[in-house]
Each structure stands twice: as C-alpha cells, then as structure tokens.
Amino acid sequence: MRGESKLDKRQLGTVFVSLWLGLGLLTACGDNPSPTPAATTPATATAPLATSTPAATPTPAPPKPDMKKVQAQLDAAWKNYTVRFIQPDGRVVDPAGGEITTSEGQSYALLRAVWQNDRPVFDKALQWTQQNLQVRPNDKLFSYKWGRNGDGKWQILDPAVASDADSDIALALIFAARRWHEPNYDRLALEILGHLWDKTVITVKGKPYLTAGDWAPAQAQPSLNPSYLSPYAYRIFAKADPAHNWTGLVETSYEVFRGCAEANLSGLAPAKLPPNWCGLDQATGQFTLPVEYPRMNLDYGYDAFRVYWRAALDYKWFGEKKALDYLTWSDTLRDKWRQDGKLAKVYDHSGKPLNDQEALSNYAGALSNFLFTEPLLADSLVLQKYMPAYQVLPNEPGGVTPGAGFAGWGEPQDYYNQNWVWFGLALFSGRLSNLAT
C-alpha cells in the first residue's frame, strides 16, 4: 500500500505540474494561437512586449521673446536716438555717412516721434526739414541730401526727390494731426501729396505707378524702387486727398512687388526676392532693367528688405490678402533661415549670397515676412539676432550730444541700422498703430 500510494502521488504531482505550466503559458500568450517563445527572440531584436509606448511627455513650447523687454528696448533706444543722432535743432545726422542729412532720415525721425508720442522731437524735426529741405522753388517736396560741400559750406547737396521720404513725411503729418489734434499738419500733408503725385507718378497702360523720384518719369524706362512703395499709406492718402487715384497705387504696388521679383532681369533665374531697383517699360508695361543698371542693381540688399516691412504693415492694418499672398509666396528667406540659421547681407537676383556678412537692418525685412507667414521663425530671429545685439554703452563717444552714450543694437554709429531694427521690432511687438483711425 505504501508503494502504491507513493506512485500515485508522483503521478498526481506530474499532472499537477503539467497543468500549472499549461495555464501559465496560456495566460502569458493570451489569445495568440502561435506564441513565439521568449527564448527564440534574438537579443538584438525588439521584443513585442518591450515596445509598449511610455507615457507621452509634453513637447516643451518653443521659447518666445520677452515682450516687456522688447518694449523697454524700443523706448530706451528711441530716447537715446533723439540725443545721439538728432541735433537740438532737429537735424538727423548720419555719422557713418559723413554727417550728411537725408529726407529719408528726417522722415524716419518724424514717424518714430509720432508713434512714440514725442511731440517736441516731432516739431523740431519738422521745422528743420521745412526750413532746409522743403526749399525747392516750384513745389512742396523735399530735397534728398543736405550736407557740407567742397568749400565747407552746409547746404543742399542733391535737390532731387526720393519719393519714399516724401510719402513717409506726409503719413507722419496725417498721424500727427490725429494724435495731437492739430489740423495744420493735415494742411501740410495735403500740399505734399498733390505735388508728390504730379512730380513722381506716371500712368502706364491706364494705371498709375509711383516712380523713385521726380527725376524718373522722364526716363525711357522709369526707375522704380520697390521698397519705396507704401500701399498702407496710399489707402490713408486716398481719404486725405480724394483728388488723386491713390487706390490705384495700392494695386500697382503689388504688381511691382511681385513683378520685379519674378522677372528674369539679368539672365539669372529669379529667386522671388525683391530687387533694390527695377525699371518699367512705358510702351509695354513690362518690368525691366533700370536705366542706370548696374549702378542701380538688382540685388536684394540695403533697400529691398523694406518691401517686406511695407507689405506686412498693409496686412496688419488693413488685412490685405494680396499682402499676405505676396509674403507667403516670397519664401526664399524662410528657407535660407531654416537651412543656415542666418541670412546674408546681400543676395543677387538668383538668390546667391554676394556678401556673407549679416546686417541687423536687413533682418527687419525677414522678421516682417516671418511674422505673418511662420511666427515661430519670427520668434527665433528676435531671440537669436536682435535681443543679443542690444547694448547700453554709457561712455560711447560719437553722438551729436556729448555724453549721450549709446543704447541700441549693433554698431553705435550706424543710424540706418538703429532705425530699421526699431521699425522691425516695433512691428513685431505691436507698437505700430494706424493712428489715422
């Protein structure tokens, strides 16, 4: 009996173990009718049970510029600009340009002053501009350049008109009339607008085009500077001066923006970048080389970047679809920024870099494009290029006011750079309001 009981227990134990192993295998394999034994999985393979997805980790949001810091820089830079680059009499000095003064420089001071609500600076800059540049005998437009002649005398060096400056001055006056409730500013603006139309606008194929200045309409192929065109301003001018077809200039501005950028002007495949200069064939209405090419070049550079800022402002203020379509279409700089993390100072008409150095002023154009097409790129540009470039140098020499020091971006003597970094960041941060409304 003892032997039989012993045998029965072993048999029962074997059955029990078999059942236990079988249940364990079924439990591990679930409903899979052909489970792969763990031992057959190579050590280098990824076992199915080991690939369970871990709990998702939220992707951190890309860093964004500190807007309070941006606003503080804009205010401090303007305050410093008024004593470093603007004389007490209201003349804006370009230290790097032989201390000349241009109608462009005066127009920038007037626009910035009215946006900053700085009427004392506005009024003194306006007075100097009227007394020294608005002295042409037959109109109320502004001579382009003023400075020291070969005999050491300070005077007009170039009486020609630069149409962008006169447009910007007129816009600043309209803004000032609204902001400070002074109707006389409106009267001054209206005088400028009438003469600006008469002296610089041509009609080709029944459409008006703003040329680069009063010297351009007489050319066989009148010179155009796309960056001189301000469609947002023309909408405002149309209300102030209904006697002229400013709305027509809005339409042709976008023709110039895109037409000059996509025209095969130099035998090179165009890269969708606006050129510094362009020409308009009055017989055919086609965009062509400027008469003074190559002095008036086709590069994307010192002038051309402003096209994007002007188109972006039209989109911001008026929601103009053509502006957004143009900015979106012109994607070359976005591609180059993603690829290189920087932009060259100058590109030729085909998009080839001609000067690999960077220019803080030129970044204002890219920033304006990025802001309304890919805002994350705009954030990255501000963080990588503009915020680190800001500096305060209490003992920096070279300003028109001794002891003024420097607060701004990059080279302290570069008046153009200080203006356009300010304009770019002011657009980015929402500082630029349409004061005409």
Image: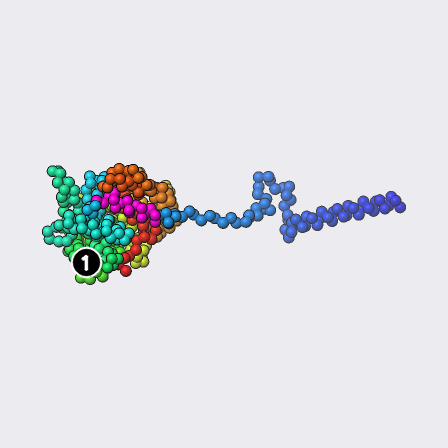
Q: Image height check: is 364 above or below 150?
A: below
Rendered image quadrant of residue 236: bottom left
Can residue 226 be seen here? The reply is no
Report if residue 81 lies within the magenta region: yes
The secondary structure type at the circle numbered 1 is helix
Residue 333 placement (x, y as % from top left): 33, 46
Q: Which residue is mark 1?
A: 184
Question: What crowding class fits label 1: few (fewer than 14 Cα within 10 Å), some (14-19), or many (20 or more)?
Answer: few
Amino acid carrying mark 1 in the image: Asn
- Residues 115 and 311: in front is 115
Rendered image quadrant of residue 248: bottom left
The residue that appears at 20% across and 50% down in the rendered structure is 124
Report if residue 419 lies within the magenta region: no
- Residues 273 and 94: in front is 94
- Residues 404 and 204: in front is 404
Question: How many numbered badges does the structure rendering display?
Answer: 1
- Residues 142 and 176: in front is 176
Q: Main secondary structure of the magenta part?
A: helix
The residue that appears at 26% across and 50% down in the rendered structure is 112
The residue that appears at 28% across and 60% down in the rendered structure is 437
56 on left or right of 38: left
Residue 81 placement (x, y as % from top left): 27, 45
The residue that appears at 61% across and 42% down in the rendered structure is 41
**Figure colour scheme:** rainbow
Which range is magenta?
Answer: 71-87
Residue 412 placement (x, y as % from top left): 28, 40
Give the farthest residue toward the right. 1
Can residue 40 be seen here? The reply is yes
Residue 375 placement (x, y as % from top left): 37, 50
